[in-house]
Structure formats: C-alpha cells, structure tokens
C-alpha cells in the first residue's frame, strides 16, 4: 500500500533513526540460534552490537511498537507499525528480541490483566528484562489440554501450586512462567482452571531438560512442589483461565 502524504515524515524519521541505531552486524539473515536475542535477567548476547540493537529498540518502544507507551510500547498506529516493519525489512534488520512475553503473554495481559499487572509486567517484557516460558502441556494433558492436573490450592493469602508440566520450551532459561492450574477440581474440566504467573526462582520449582533422539532440545519437564504464589498473580478471573489460555493460543498461532 503506498504511503499517504501524511505518512512520509514518519517514514523519513524511521529511516533516519534506523540508519543511526541499527548496527551493520544486525542486518542480514540470522545464522543460527545464537543470533537470536532472548533477553532475560541474565541475558546472553552474541556480541555488543546485538545488545545495543535490543536496547535501542526497547528504549524507543519498538520491540512492541503497537503497545501503549505507558506499558513500554511505541504507541504507533497500525499504519505506522506497517511502515516500521517495511523499513526494518528494507535494511534486513534482525528481530531485536525473541520473546514469549511479547508474542504470547503480552497480548493476554493487555486484554485480561489488571491495570497493576499491566504496569508491572508489560514494560519489563518490552525491555527484554524478563524471559517467560509457557506452562500449559502436561504428560496427560497435551491435545486434551483442559485435562490438566497441576493444582493451585487457595491458602488464604497465597496459592500453593503442585504438579508437572512438559514440553516447556526454554523453561531452564526462563525467569517467569505463565501457567495453567486447576483451582477448582470439582468444576467441569474447562472451568476451574486459573491462569497464574510466577517466578521460576520460587522455592519448589525445578526444571529438567528433555533429550530427544535427535540430541538436546529446547524442551523441559517442569515440576512444582509446594510453590507459593501471591494471590494477585492470577490473570483474569479465578476459574476462568481457559478464556485467557485460548486467547493467548490465538497469538501463539500468529507467531
Ligand atoms: C515446537 C514446540 C514447542 C512447544 N512448546 C511448548 C511450551 O513451551 N509449553 C507447553 O506447555 N507446551 C509446548 N508444546 C506442546 C504442544 O503445544 C502440545 O501441547 C503437545 O505437543 C501435544 O501434547 P502431546 O505431545 O501429549 O500429544 P498428544 O495429546 O498425546 O497427541 C499425540 C497425537 O495424537 C493425536 N490425538 C490426540 N487425541 C486424539 C483424539 N482424541 N483423537 C484423534 N487423535 C488424537 C494428536 O492430534 C497428535 O497427533 C510445544 C510443542 C512443540 C511442537
């Protein structure tokens, strides 16, 4: 779609900014997993250019150009996002930040999160400061995801989480998890599920990488043994996590 007259200044601004801020080493096709920057509490950068590129894009809000500015985004309109995408493609700029926070959790928080949750979690996702993993699948809950058995029991001032997840991609490298748990075992299986967020450094969380026949994989088994999760770390209504889970899967499929 050609630019309207009003779009031209923005395109010029983007071009000039990218000329200055996108290092030459960050242009051209990625050459393997180490060219992917995932951020996190202990980020691993292939080189300084990769770090500078992620930080520059994050500071501008362009790791999530369509998110509101107050949550760390660029606040761009859909037309502006399209121009930014075109200009990034024109110089073959690499994705500055791979992130399940951006592609999966963020959209779910924008729709279902409280204002406090959005302000707490979204900016650190946008800046690549926290790496998230997805705790959905279980040994007996894959295709039949709603059969999940990981429990979160209401202990008054916290949830107590017990159970096991499987195929948790990069769980061993993640800082936090978004996790489907059963909070009401008596309810029909698609109800009684709640969508919890918690720190992977919480006591009682362990991960074990899964070795596939082809060698190592990004997959892990993830175990929860009396993990205490603060009450305010439920996204959406208690017992209605299935709605959040399905909405998030829509974004995962887009990814
Ligand atoms: C690259 C990749 C990354 C992933 N990352 C994550 C992650 O980070 N977090 C996470 O939670 N999960 C992750 N998963 C897991 C994934 O999303 C699915 O939940 C999981 O692969 C399906 O579960 P399962 O392996 O137990 O398969 P099963 O449910 O056992 O299914 C195996 C086969 O049986 C078929 N089948 C099952 N039930 C029926 C039925 N009733 N009738 C007919 N056919 C049936 C299925 O279609 C499938 O072909 C990942 C998967 C992949 C491939």
Image (tube, rainbow, N blue to C red):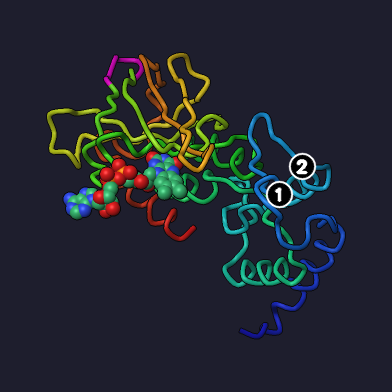
The residue pinned by badge 1 equals: 35
Residue 35, image x, y percentages? 71, 49
Q: Is the Cβ of the residue at disc 1 closer than 8 Å to that at disc 2?
A: yes
Q: Is residue 100 magenta?
A: no
Residue 37 drawn at (x, y percent): 68, 45
- The quarter of the picture where residue 79 lies is bottom right
Which label belongs to residue 71?
A: none
Closer to the camera in the image, 237 or 105: 105
- Which residue lies at the image location 58% right of the left edge and 59% below the top edge? 66
Q: Is residue 88 above or below residue 233?
A: below
Above or below, comparing residue 1 to residue 110 in the picture: below
Report which residue position mark 2 lands on.
46
Q: Nearer the viewer, residue 102 or 25?
A: 25
Q: Is residue 157 magenta?
A: yes
Which residues are the magenta region?
153-159
Q: Is residue 236 left or right of residue 67?
A: left
C-alpha distance separating marks 1 and 2: 7 Å
| Residue 113 image position (x, y, % from top left) | 42, 41
Q: Residue at x 30, y 31 (%)?
A: 181
- Crowding around mark 2 (Cα neighbors within 10 Å: few <14, some 14 to 19, many 20+) is few
Task: State whether residue 101 appears in this view.
Answer: yes
Mark 2 falls on what kind of element?
Answer: loop
Q: Secondary structure at mark 1?
A: helix
State the quadrant of the N terminus.
bottom right
Where is residue 155 shown, x and y percent of the image?
Answer: 29, 14
Indicate if the residue with disc 2 has its beta carbon within 8 Å of ligand 1.
no
Graded by Cα atoms within 10 Å as few (under 14), some (14 to 19) or many (20 or more), the crowding at tag 1 reads some
Q: Looking at the image, can residue 112 be seen?
A: no
- At 66% from the left and 42% from the top, the residue drawn is 127
Is 199 placed left or right of 142 in the picture? right
């Amino acid at each position: 779609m050609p630019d309207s007259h009003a779009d031209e200044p923005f395109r010029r601004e983007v071009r000039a900014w990218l000329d200055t801020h996108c290092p030459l080493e960050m242009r051209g096709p990625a050459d393997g997993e180490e060219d992917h920057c995932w951020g996190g509490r202990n980020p691993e950068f292939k080189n300084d250019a990769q770090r500078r590129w992620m930080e520059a894009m994050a500071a501008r809000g362009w790791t999530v150009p369509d998110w509101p500015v107050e949550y760390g985004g660029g606040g761009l309109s859909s037309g502006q996002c399209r121009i930014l995408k075109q200009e990034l493609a024109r110089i073959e700029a690499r994705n500055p930040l791979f992130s399940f926070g951006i592609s999966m959790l963020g959209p779910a928080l924008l729709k279902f999160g409280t204002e406090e949750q959005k302000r707490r979690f979204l900016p650190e996702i946008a800046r690549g400061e926290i790496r998230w993993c997805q705790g959905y699948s279980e040994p007996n809950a894959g295709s039949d995801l709603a059969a999940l058995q990981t429990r979160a029991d209401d202990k008054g001032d916290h949830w107590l989480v017990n159970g096991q997840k499987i195929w948790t991609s990069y769980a061993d490298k993640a800082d936090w998890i978004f996790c489907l748990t059963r909070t009401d075992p008596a309810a029909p299986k698609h109800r009684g599920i709640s969508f919890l967020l918690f720190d992977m450094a919480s006591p009682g969380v362990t991960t074990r990488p899964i070795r596939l026949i082809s060698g190592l994989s990004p997959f892990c088994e993830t175990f929860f043994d009396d993990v205490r999760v603060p009450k305010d770390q439920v996204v959406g209504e208690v017992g209605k996590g299935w709605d959040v889970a399905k909405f998030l899967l829509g974004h995962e499929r887009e990814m």
